[in-house]
Amino acid sequence: MRGKKKTLWGILTLLCILACSSMTVFAADEAAEYVPEMYASFWALVPPIVAIVLALITKEVYSSLFVGILIGGIFYSGFEFETTITHVFQDGIVGVLSDSYNVGILVFLVVLGIMVCMMNKAGGSAAFGRWASVHIKSRVGAQLATVLLGVLIFIDDYFNCLTVGSVMRPVTDKHNVSRAKLSYLIDATAAPVCIIAPISSWAAAVTGFVEGEDGFSIFIRAIPYNYYALLTIVMMITIIVMNIDYGPMKLHESNALKGDLYTTPDRPYANAEEEINESKGGVIDLVFPIVVLIVCCVIGMIYTGGFFGGTGFVEAFSNSDASVGLMLGSFFAFIITIVFYAVRRVLKFGESMSCVPEGFKAMVPAILILTFAWTLKAMTDSLGAAEYVAGVMESAAGGLVNLLPAIIFLVGCFLAFATGTSWGTFGILIPIVVAVFAGTNETMMIISISACMAGAVCGDHCSPISDTTIMASAGGQCNHVNHVSTQLPYAVTAAAVSFVTYVIAGFVQNAFICLPIGIVLMIGTLVVIKKLKSDN
C-alpha cells in the first residue's frame, strides 16, 4: 500500500512538473511574441543617441548611459512602469552580466589590471621608464613608439588598449604627452590595426559573417580597400611628425607641455605613480609578463578554435572565441608571472596576491561603463535597431550602385556610433552586401565589405559607448569624456577623407589607384588644417 502511495505521489509530482514546464514554455512563447510598437523604427536609435549627446554635454558618462538605457526600457514597454523596470534590470543589466562572452571579457580585464599592478609593484614599469628615457629622447619619439607598439600588438583590441597603455604611459608622461593624446594613439592603433590584421579576433569575427563565400580570402582582399583603418595610421604618423594638433586636443597638449597631463579637474589615477617601486626590478620584469601574455592569449584563442584538435592555425583563429581565449590566456600568464617574480625575488607571493584587489579596483570604472554600454545595446536590440538599419540599407541598394560603398561606409559609421559595437555592425551589413553583389560584381562586393568594416571601425572609434573607446580611456588612464571629445575631430577628419576615397573607389574599382589618392588627400588635408591654425 505504501509503495502504491509512493508511486501515486511520484506520478502526481511528475504531472505537476510537466504542467509547470508547459506553462513556462507558453509564457516564453508569449514573451517571445511581444513586439514593441516602436520596433524596427527610427525610435530604436533614439536611446543611444540621447546617451551620447548627454555624455558630451554633461561630461558625465555613467548617468548619461543610464538615462539612455531607461529611455530604451520605456520605449520597449510602451511607457508601462513595471515592464520598463523589469526590462532594464532583468533583461538588460542582469542579462548582459549573465552572458558568458561578456563575463569572459570582464575576467580578462580584471586579470590584466592585476598584472599591471604587479608590474608596477615589481619595478618593471619604472625600469622600462628609465630605459626609455635613455633611448627615447623626444615627444615625437615617445608618440611614435606608442604607435609602433600598438601596431605590433594586433591580436585583439582590448588586449592592445590595456597593454600599450600600461607600457607606454610612464614614457609619454615623462615627455609631457597629454593623457588625452595617449588615449587617442592607443584607440587609433587598436581597432584600425586589428581590422587589417589577418590573424586577429576581428578577422575571425568578419570571416564568420561572410556566409556562402571564402570569408578569409575576402578579408585579405578587402585590406587595401579598408581606407579608414589605413588612413588613420597615416594620419597618426603625420600629426606626430608634423606636430599638428587641433580641436580640444590642442588645449590638452598645450597644458601637458606646462606639466598638466589631464587639463580637467577629474584626474583618474593621478596618484598611481606612488604604487610604482623604483628600487628593484628590471626591464625584464615588464617585458617578460607581456611576452608571456601575448603567447598565452594566442594559444588560448587557437585552442578555442580547435587547433589542438587538428584544425589548421588560420582556420583555428577564424573559429576562435576571443572571450574564452583571452580569459584563459591571461589567467595562465598571471600564474606564470607570479612564479617568475617569486623566482627572481622581486615580488613575494603575498605581495602578488595583494595586487588582486588593487588590480580589480583599477578596472572598476571600465567595468561599470562597459556594463552600461552593453545594457544600452541590449535595449536597442530589443527595439529592432538592426532590422531598421537593414531595411534602410536594402532599400538603398537598388540605385546608384557606384556610390554604394560610400553609402555603406556612412551607414556603418552611424550604426556603430549609435550602438557602440563594430562587430554588431558587421553582422548586420556584411550579409546584406554579400546578398546584393554575390555572383554579379565581385570587386564591388569586396569594396563594399571593406566599407562595412571601415564604417564600423570609424563609428566604434568615435562612439563614447564603444567598448574599445572605453578600454582606450582605461589604458591611457584618461577621463573618458575627455578622450571622446579630443579624438572626435581627428576621427571625423579621417572619416571625411575615407568617404571621398570610397566615392572614387566605387567608380575606379582599383586598389592601387585609390589608396595612393586617399593617402595624398589625407596628408594634404592635415597640411591645410595646420596652415589654417597657424594663420589664426
Image: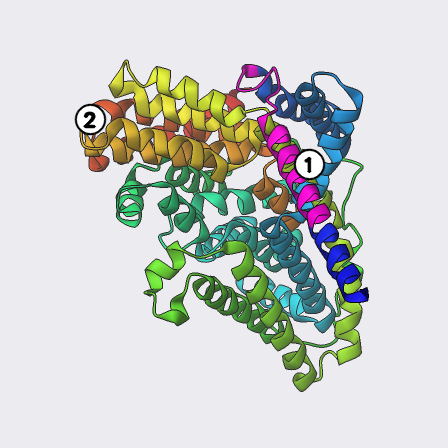
Q: Magenta segment: does it hold 32?
A: yes
Residue under label 1:
91
If the image is split into quadrants, where does the N terminus sit?
A: bottom right
At x 79%, y 60%, the residue is 5
Q: Nearer the viewer, residue 288 or 123?
A: 288
Q: Which of the numbered marks, if any, corresponds to residue 508?
A: 2
The residue carrying pointer 1 sits among few (fewer than 14), some (14 to 19) or many (20 or more) residues within 10 Å by Cα, namely: some
Is 438 on the left or on the right of 502, as rendered?
left
Residue 535 in picture, x, y percent from top left: 52, 20
- Indicate the secondary structure of the residue bearing disc 1: helix
Q: Magenta segment: does it hold 22?
A: yes
Q: Which residues are magenta?
A: 15-42
Which mark is first along the chain, 2 or 1? 1
Is 164 on the left or on the right of 524, as rendered?
right
In the rendered image of this protein, does residue 280 appear above or below residue 128? below
Q: Which of the numbered marks, if any, corresponds to residue 377?
A: none
The residue carrying pointer 2 sits among few (fewer than 14), some (14 to 19) or many (20 or more) residues within 10 Å by Cα, namely: few
At x 38%, y 61%, the residue is 316
Q: Nearer the viewer, residue 481 or 366?
A: 366
Residue farthest to the left, as pictured: 440
| Residue 257 visible in the displayed image | no
Q: Residue 488: which quarter of the image?
A: top right
Q: Amino acid at mark 1?
A: Asp
Residue 199 in picture, x, y percent from top left: 38, 56
Q: Amino acid at mark 2?
A: Val
At x 46%, y 22%, the residue is 389
Residue 293 in picture, x, y percent from top left: 55, 67
Q: How is the image coloured?
A: rainbow
Residue 320 in picture, x, y percent from top left: 44, 57
